[in-house]
Amino acid sequence: METIEAYLDRKHREIGLLNDCLKNPRRLPRPRSVDEVIKAKFQLAAMLHAEHALQDWKATETAWSGSACPTSGPFAFSYDYQRADLTVTGPSFYELEHGCISGTIYSASGMAAISTLLLASASSFANGDILVLPGSYGETLELIERFVPSLRLVPLKLPLPDAFARIGTPRILLLDSCVSAGAFEAVLRRDGAGLDLLVFDTTCFAGRSGRIRRVLRWTKRCKLPVVMVRSHNKLDSLGAEYGRLGSAVFVSWSEQGADPGRSMVERLAADTSNAVRLLGGAALPAHFPPYVGSDAYWALTKARVAAILRNGRHAARLFARELASLAAELHFTHGLYVTLRAGHAFDEASARQAAEAMSHDLSRKGHPIRHAGSFGFDFAATEWFHDATTGRYSVRVAVPDLPTEPWSDLAAAIAEWWRSNQCRL
C-alpha cells in the first residue's frame, strides 16, 4: 500500500528528473495533489521540447549546417537529408540477455516500426505464414491483411498442441504484449524450434520487464531469431507522453555461429532500414526523451510500473466481483488495463460515447480520469476498444499510477458508474 505522501515524494523525484534536463532548471515545490503532478510533468515535457528546438535550430530536415551536433539528453544523432541515414548513439530501452547480438533501428512510431519490418520481410519470407494469437493488436492484423500480401495470416487457437511444428513453409510468430495471460503462457510452454522468426511487440511491457527476459530466454533455447518492436510513447517516458517514437531491435544468438538465421536477421535489418528510409518513417531526434537511461530513471520507471500493476490487480478483482458479466477481459498479460462491456453489443461510436461519458461524469466529481487513447499515465484513461479476434467492441480502462487509496476510490466509482448507467450505454 502506498500512501499519498509517499506517492507525492516519488512524483517529486520524477518531476525533478525532467526539470534537471532543462538548461536552466526551475525551482519547483513538492506537488500537493495528483492534478499538480500531471500538470507539472506535461508542462516540463513541453519546455524540454521548446528548449530542444531552440538549442538545435541548425539541425534541420536538410542538415544544411555542418556544425550541427543534435542531441537529446544522452542520445546523439547524425544524419543527412531527411534523416534517411539516421544514426543514434545512446542508452538502450531494454536490458538484453547475455550472449545476444543486437542492432536497433528507430522509427517515427511503434506502428512505423512494425509496418516497415513486415513490409521488409517480403524478400526473406515470400509466401510465408505469420501466426497470430487471439487478442493481437487490431491495427497490426489490419496492416498484414491489407498491405503485406507476401505473408499469409494464420490465426491460432488455444491450446497450441502442434502449432509451431516445422512444415517447410517459412513461418513467423507474432507475439503481442497485449494478448491474454493464457495465450502468452501457452506460447512459452511450446517448443519454438520449428519457427523461423519471432516478432515480439513489447509495447505493453516495461523495458526491463521479467516477461521480456522470459521470452528472450525462450528464443535462446529454441535458437530462434527475434525482432522486438516497440512504441516508446507509453511506458518509457514517465507518463509524460514525450513524443512519437518507435524501434525495432534485431536479436540473434552468438551460439548460432554461422547459422543462416543470423544472416537472415542481418538481411532483414538492412531491408527494414531501407523501408524506413523509403517510406519516410525515420525517427525525430526531438522525440527521444532526454531524461532516460540513468539509474534514477530506471528506479522511477520500475516503481511507477509496479504501482500500475498493483492497481491493475486490484481493479481486476473488484470488477470481477462487482461487474461479473459486464467485464470483457480482466487478465491481459501486461496488467495495464481492463475492458468492460455493456448489456448490449457496442459498436465503435457507442463504445467511444460510453468512455467519454464515464470520464466526464467521474472527473467532475474530482477523480483523476480522462478520455484518452493511450495508457501508462498518472490518471486513468478510458477509450473504446476493438477485439480484432472476436470483432466485439468494449471500453478500455487504462490503470493509472496512483496511490492506493485514491485508486481504490476511483475503481469503486468506475464500477458503480458502469453498473448504474447500463440504460444509457
Image (tube, rainbow, N blue to C red):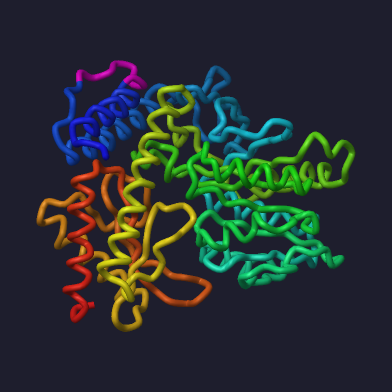
Q: Position of residue 357 (x, y in %)?
A: 20, 67
Q: Is residue 184 left or right of residue 349?
A: right
Residue under the image location 43 percent in, 32 percent down = 289
State the residue in front, 228 or 272. 228
Please state, as top left, top right, bottom left or bottom right, where the C terminus lies in the image. Answer: bottom left
By secondary structure, the bulk of the magenta-drawn segment is best described as loop
User: Relative to 127, does residue 207 appear above or below in the rendering?
Assistant: above
The part of the chain drawn in magenta is 20-27
Q: Quadrant of residue 396?
A: bottom left
| Figure check: 74 above or below 245 | above
Q: Residue furthest bottom?
A: 344
Decide which of 82, 97 is in the foreground and name it: 97
Q: Residue at x 33, y 19 (%)?
A: 20
- Identified at 35% across, 52% down, the residue is 312
**From this viewpoint, which residue is outermost toward the right?**
258
Could you tell me how many numbered marks the image carries? 0
- Residue situated furthest left in the rendering: 365
Describe residue 179's horizontal placement relative to residue 349 as left or right. right
The answer to whether residue 325 is magenta is no
Give x and y (percent) for residue 239. 35, 40
**Is residue 21 found inside the magenta-colored segment of the image?**
yes
Question: Is 377 left or right of 152, judged from the image as shown?
Answer: left
State the image coordinates of residue 366 (x, y, percent, origin top left).
Answer: 11, 51
Look at 22% across and 53% down and name the residue there. 369
